[in-house]
Image (tube, rainbow, N blue to C red):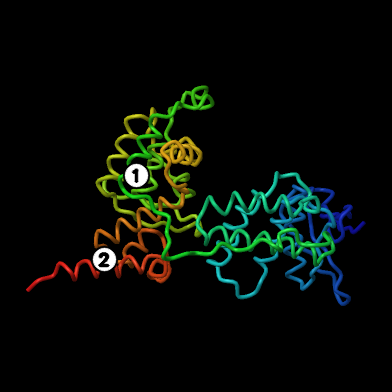
Amino acid sequence: MLGSMKNTLVATDYPNLYRSKESEIFYARIDTGRKTVKKSLKTRVLTEALSRLAGFLAEQGRDELPVESVSWYLAVDMYVQRQEMRPHLKPAAVESIKFFSSRAKKLVARDIAAEAITEQMCRAWWKKDALSVSARTANGTLAVVKNVFSMLQEAGSIKSNPAAKLERMTLMSSNLNVPEKEDFRRIVEEVKKAPILRKWQKKGLYSEAADMIAFLAYSGLRIEEVRRLVWGDIGKESISVPDIKHATSRRTLYINASLAEVIESLRRERRGNSPDDPVFAIESPRKALTNACIRLGLPHVRIHDLRHFFATSCIEAGIDIPTVAKWLGHRDGGALAMKIYGHLRDEHSKEAARKLTF
């Protein structure tokens, strides 16, 4: 027992982790040989304390983990804490790590032990996740998953990395899966015909799937951005979009005529439109979109393909790529959008040249 008159620290079952007898706050403590380093972890919650202890150990140049056996959620939190302690890591990079880490947690249920995760479980998750988002987001999430397992392997918590053989998604710039405009209209109408799910009926909600699909396609927003929208974000002429990768940042998206119609439809259907009310009550229209494509005999359309639909429609309408990139929330001045959609701009330029006469 380590004591002082005001703060008595009691050792826990975990190395380097102590708890104040008086306040029950957890503390980190290590002996460097020359001195003892102590730091308050500012929490009474054990899982939070272990996560912050991992960051403290990394800050002190120690590679070990505070526990041998951890849940997957705790392992991811430890990884984030260790990354935050890296010197010279820019705030934007930290926000990206946090974003991809939050997605990585969906690999398994909260309480599943990391050592219990198999390669088969990883493959099942990757097969589903890789088809639900853009290649860039999927690959970023996969990188975090692999890095967390590598961290555990280096610490001796697991023998091998079950995600090591998973391959990154390839971004095919010239083969975008974008539905034709007429096919897209058919999809939206087909979704409207679908019966309302029982769980929505029980909650007193109507099926918003068709409106959400149209909203995504006419705004170009990411599904995570749409989930976070509240009515206070939507003005008469623009939407203040919360940035999912930079918590304190927002961007402005101007409302086009098609998007305005969808917003008006939502206002009519929804009961509450107070500023703090979410615009959508459902998490995702993914199943409705997939089923509509199946019934119509159309190629599978992912949620992220609706973002491509927006971008390609803008470029075909003559809007320059830097502007489209800004609307999409890219921060690279259009470099990524040029890589993905540049061939469309070239095709549009050729078509315009053919029509040009003097």
Per the image, the residue denoted by label 2 is: 348
Q: Which residue is mark 1?
A: 183
SS of the residue at dot 2? helix
Element under disc 1: helix
Q: Does 332 appear above or below 50?
A: below
Q: Determine crowd level at label 1: few under 14, some 14-19, many 20+ residues with C-alpha closer than 10 A.
A: some
Extreme residue in the right direction: 1
* Residue found at x 43% / y 61%: 175
Question: Residue 185: x, y in percent?
Answer: 32, 41
- Rendered view: 149 above or below 71: below
* Left or right: residue 329 compared with residue 130: left
Q: Is residue 3 above or below residue 88?
A: above
User: Identity of the amino acid at label 2?
Assistant: His
Residue type, numbered disc 1: Asp
Q: Residues within 10 Å of mark 2 (few under 14, many from 20)?
A: some
Q: Residue, x 49% and y 23% (percent of image)?
A: 201
> Which residue is pictured at 62% across the width and 57% down the height?
101
